[in-house]
Image: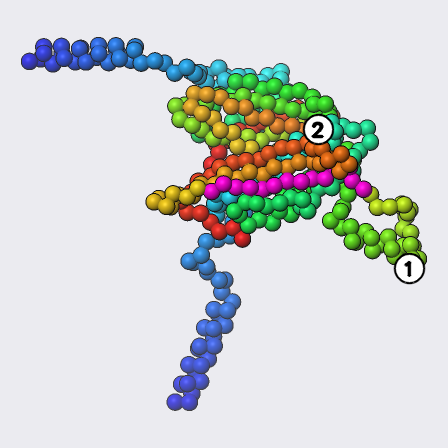
Amino acid sequence: MKIRIRGLLGAVLAVAAVAACAPTQNTVGVAVREIPQGERGPVAGVGIEGSDIMAMTDRMMRDMLQSPVLAGAGVPPQVIVDGEHFVNESAQRINKNTIADRLRVNLNRAANGRMVFVARHNAAMVEQERALKRDGKVDVGTTGLTRAAAGADYRLSGRISSLDAVNVGSGMTQRYNQIIFEMVDLERGTIVWSNIYEFTRAAADDVVYR
Amino acid sequence: MMWSIAKAAAVAAGAAALLAACTPKPAVQCDFTPMMQTDAAGDPALLPLTPGTMKPMALNTVSVIDAGIRRKVLVQSVQASRTATGNVAVETRLMNCTDHPLQVDGRTNFLTTGGGSAEAPSMWQRVYLPPRSFASYAESSVSGPNAATLLIEVKEGR
């Protein structure tokens, strides 16, 4: 009897060992798949999607580089492109930095020196290093000291807003999404460039943005 | 009996022909045959590395990459110019030859004189085409003088 139990235990352990080595079959799930950049994936709703962020920042970047004020000035203007003055007043929860960051990165790469980008979002980091240099705790580096950190000529501002309509009978949801971008002259307070990205979508089964 | 059936059929055919003649023809009528026969010989084109493996792709024009809309959307014009900042601005006018609204996506590849990529292709941009009407797709390069030629791709918007 003892031998039989031992044999049974051995068989169970052998089966467990084989099961542990076997590849996991996620038979009831949906396999992970890559979504081509800029294309809508299988989970989409009436709001701003990742593909919209890519499309809108690409369009804004291209448009800004056609502006003689921003990309055709004799002395490259110093600009701040961050999410600090980009406000979200829409019904959708969204990390506005995804818009500002993508715009700044692509604009900086494409501008190729036609604009100078001030990293105001890293101001604390810059101040810390400047203080260390001036206190003599670290050397001055190789590019030398400046009287002050860079100021900006223009800064990005923007607003995300939306207008929702719901048909309670059919459950259809419709949303108008509007995203505006403006470059503000930080001395005169004028708007030197602006553009808009807008679209309307309707769906019966909306998704949750989080 | 035979005679009356034949007479009725003739009357019906006549009525149908009359009705067809009275039905107003759509304002926009498209003929895709000349577009399909366009030969890019002599024009700038993307050539295959191994001759004969790929049909040359004409540059500075529109390539409808989606077979589903190849006989629905007609390219009416393509115009390109240099902007004040030295970039290329291109605009193409697309005609919807169907009786229902269409959505298409367009993107532009800006290329150097040598045929290399001057910059990353633009992101897909949605264009809404009303029935029997047209809309424009426009794009601008960002790489200044590097962009010498271009190729616009159009597919059905989904």
Q: Amino acid at mark 2?
A: Ser
Whether residue A22 appears in magenta in the rendering, the answer is no
Is A40 above or below relative to A132? above
User: Circle 1 marks a residue in which chain?
Assistant: A
Secondary structure of the residue carrying tag 2 is loop
- Across and down, in percent, residue B143 comes to 71, 30
Label 2 vs 1, first from the N-terminus: 2
- The residue at the point 18 percent across, 10 percent down is B10
Q: Could you tell me which residue is drawn at 87 percent across and 55 percent down?
A: A131
Horizontal side of residue B29 vs B145, given as left or right: left
Identify the disc placed on residue B107.
none
Question: In the picture, which quadrant includes the N terminus of chain B?
Answer: top left
B146 left or right of A145 in image: left
Note whether residue B46 is visible: no
Q: Chain of mark 2?
A: A
Residue that numbered label 1 is attached to: A137
Q: Which residue is mark 2?
A: A67
Is A154 one of the magenta-colored residues? yes
Main SS type for the magenta part? strand
In the figure, residue A52 lies in which quadrant? top right
Residue range in magenta is: A151-164
Q: Which of A40 and A177 lies nearest the eye of the viewer?
A: A177
